[in-house]
Image: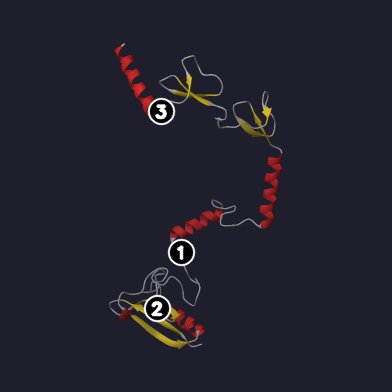
Amino acid sequence: MTIYYVYAYLRKDGSPYYIGKGKGNRMFQDHIWHHPPKYKHRIVILESKLTELGALALERRYIRWYGRKDLSTGILINKTDGGDGASGYSPPAAVREKYSLRSLGENNGMYGKKHTDEVKKASSIRRSKTNSARRWYHDGVVSRFLKECPDGWTPGRINQKPTTSGKKYYNNGIVNMMVLEKPPGDEWVLGMLPKQINKTKRKKQWHHLQKL
C-alpha cells in the first residue's frame, strides 16, 4: 500500500534537523527524543505515496546524506540510522555505564526477570515444609513460632492483648479502675465515675495536696 511518506523538520534557515518516515498524521506527533516544530510550515514531506519498504529505504538514504550530529557526521538530531528499529542507535554515556555494570554482575541475578511457575511452586512447597516443623510456644508472657520448645516454655500461644472479659469497674471517688476479682481496697466501690466528676475531683485533690 502506497500510504507512507518521508518527512523532514526544518530549522529557521531551511536546513533539516530531523528526517522521519510515517503515515497519516505521524509527522505532527511527538517523538521519543524531540517534538515537532511549533510552526507547521517547517514540516515538509520529502517523498509521498510510498510503500513501507520504499519509505524505510528513503529514510535511511536521507539520514545518511545529511548525517547525524551525535555521530559528528552531519546536521540531523536523529538517534538511529532510520529504516525502522534502533539500528545505529548510540545510547548516552550514563546508559552505557549502567549496562556495563549490569553485565559485570552489579545488578545481576533475577534483575528484570520473573520466576517460572515451577520455581514458584517449589518455593511454596519449601516454605510449607519449613513452617510445618514450627510450633507456637509461650513462657506466659510472650509467644514465639519456633522449631523447638525452649526450656521453661509451654506449647501453645497466649493472647498477646489483655482481655477485659469478666472485669468490672470500681472507683475510689477520684479515679476508675478495671479489675477482674476484688477491688484494691475497702474505699473502692463498684461502678464507674463520670469523666467530668472524675476530672473535677482530681483537680480538688491536686489543690489540696499543694496546700499541704
Q: Are marks 3 and 1 in contact (CB under 8 Å)?
A: no
* Residue under the image location 42 percent in, 22 percent down: 175
Secondary structure beneath disc 2? helix
Q: Are marks 2 and 3 in contact (CB under 8 Å)?
A: no
Question: Which residue does the numbered mark 3 point to in the structure image?
Answer: 194
Give x and y (percent) for residue 177: 48, 23
Which circle marks residue 91 in the picture? 1
C-alpha distance separating marks 1 and 2: 24 Å
Identity of the residue furthest to the top in this view: 212
Label 3 CA crowd tier, 10 Å (few <14, some 14–19, many 20+): few
Secondary structure beneath disc 3? loop
| 180 over 18 or under it: above or below | above
Lower position in the chain sequence, tag 2 or tag 3 = 2
Looking at the rendered structure, the kind of residue marked 2 is: Met
Give x and y (percent) for residue 133: 71, 38
Q: What colour scheme was applied to this rendering of the protein?
A: secondary structure
Secondary structure beneath disc 1? loop
Lower position in the chain sequence, tag 3 or tag 1 = 1
Quadrant placement of the C terminus:
top left
Q: Looking at the picture, tell me which residue is in the foreground, 120 or 112.
A: 120
Question: Which residue does the numbered mark 2 point to in the structure image?
Answer: 27
Looking at the rendered structure, the kind of residue marked 1 is: Pro
The reply, left or right, for residue 93 in relation to residue 107 is left
Q: Nearer the viewer, mark 3 or mark 1?
A: 3
Give x and y (percent) for residue 100: 52, 56
Residue 68: image quadrant is bottom left
* Residue under the image location 41 percent in, 28 percent down: 194
Looking at the rendered structure, the kind of residue marked 3 is: Pro
Label 1 CA crowd tier, 10 Å (few <14, some 14–19, many 20+): few
